[in-house]
Image (cartoon, rainbow, N blue to C red):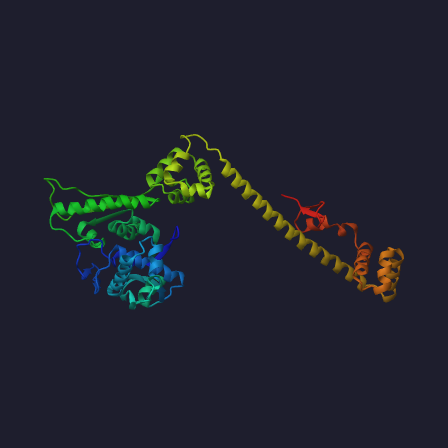
Amino acid sequence: MDKTIYVEHDVNFLENSLWKTDLRDKRDEFIIEFKNGGRYEYKAIDGIPDDIDAVFLYYFLLASQKENWAIEMAFRPSIVLKELNMPVNSQYYKRLETSLKRWHGVRAVYTNSFFTKQKNKEGVLVKAHVTKRFNIFKSESIVIENKKRKSHYFRIIWDSEFLNASKESVYKKNINLKTFVSLRYPIARRLYEWLPKQFIAQEELNIYHGRLFEKLRILNAKYPSEVERKLQTIQKNIKRLNEQDFKYIYKMKYTKFDKKNKKLPILITFTRQPKVDLVNFDNEIVKQLKVIGLKNKDIDSILEKHKQNVIEQVLDNYNSLPDEKLREIENPAGYFLAMLPSSGEECLPNKASLKKKEAEKQQIIKKEKEEDKKILKKLQKSFEVFKDDKRKDALKKLSDSENEALKKEFLDNTSNFIKNFYAKKGFNCMPVKASYNVFLNEKFMKPEELDFVKYAKSKGYEVKENCYKNGYEIVDG
């Protein structure tokens, strides 16, 4: 799976989840009423999708987007499982087929509750809640059975309304499939979908526990102690989300139960703060540290103790290690931490890093020389055109007799070598013609006009003579 893969998804599908997080939730249909009079109706005919089904759905959505939002697609189960880092065996083949069946049975109806933009009477786009009905798949996914299991494949046909909702969405969010998979826990995955978008227009989110459970697809509870246990579980998953999000830290607060406080509902407050340590650091550095396997707490510590140039050099030293050495490292994060100098100390490049940088430097020099050669070639070609035009303009002004006189003067003063060519083939012979052009250039053009160095300078380039075959090189700077 690619290091960074984003799935475009309409926020309406993230605000009200299409899958459940609570395995005890057996509701195959429910209705959510909204204050504005709208409502959301959900129905799952063939089983309620869970977070594993959500992983498969995002994978298929991403594949469709890569194929310009293809509606009909075919997949090999073994490839799907392999790219999602799942076991490739009969159990997971069956799990994939079950997932397709579940998504085929999902129906979602937004009655005056699908948030989008539409044109008013004046033709101006305004925010609106409209009615939309969706299936996920238009027809059943078909598994084609072959004798060899590895050659099985299945076909899916998307519901065009569902696919277009994300394709043409006015309000969409990018879901990083790698992050979604790595969160592992259902509630953490659901929080990743839902929580970040709550801070688009506000600094703080206040929500009662019943509404929060509804958004996270967690079954509500009657007793305060049970509610608190569920809130503690959510808080644990907030920490898991913070481990994956290197831009923000999410916090969740609520009044805990004691002998004095046993009332329901509970008001929960969510806040989000940027990670101060990352403000002055290039996000690309953080991404590289993540790829090595470092967790946010380790990254925060590194950024606090070391300058950016030190971290960059250690990364260079690490990435410059031979491929064989990198493959042998069992704990890349621990190995990298061991390479860091003491706090406040500088880091010198290792031999591998120096060798790599020298190779990169030589590659840059090589490319620059190739570009210089191309520029020189174009300059010399345009210089020849310039001289040709000057000669033609001068010869047009001469009479036939004057032209003949020039040719005679040229032949009287040229070498025997050229005279022999002329005797055999005349003026159209290339050696004679080239030599005659040089004669005409000197006759009709000023010395400075015949100076290629000055011509190049007039075109904005500094060149000098050298011992190369082409006779010139571009001067740096």
Residue reaching furthest front? 147
Instruction: Give the residue at x 15% y 52%.
Output: 220
Residue reaching furthest bottom? 139
Decide if residue 193 is on the left or right side of residue 424: left
Q: Position of residue 54 (x, y in %)?
A: 28, 57
Determine the image quadrant of residue 131. bottom left
Total labels: the figure holds 0
Decide if residue 396 is on the left or right side of residue 11: right
Q: Position of residue 233 (x, y in %)?
A: 21, 46
Instruction: Give the residue at x 27% y 50%.
Output: 191
Mark yes or no: residue 288 visible: yes
Q: Nearer the viewer, residue 405 or 338?
A: 338
Quadrant showing the C terminus? top right
Residue reaching furthest left? 259
Q: Position of residue 381 (x, y in %)?
A: 69, 56
Mark yes or no: residue 170 visible: no
Instruction: Give the residue at x 50% y 38%.
Output: 352
Q: Nearer the viewer, residue 68 or 91?
A: 91
Instruction: Give the residue at x 14% y 51%.
Output: 221
Decide if residue 364 is on the left or right side of residue 390: left
Q: Nearer the viewer, residue 186 or 93?
A: 93
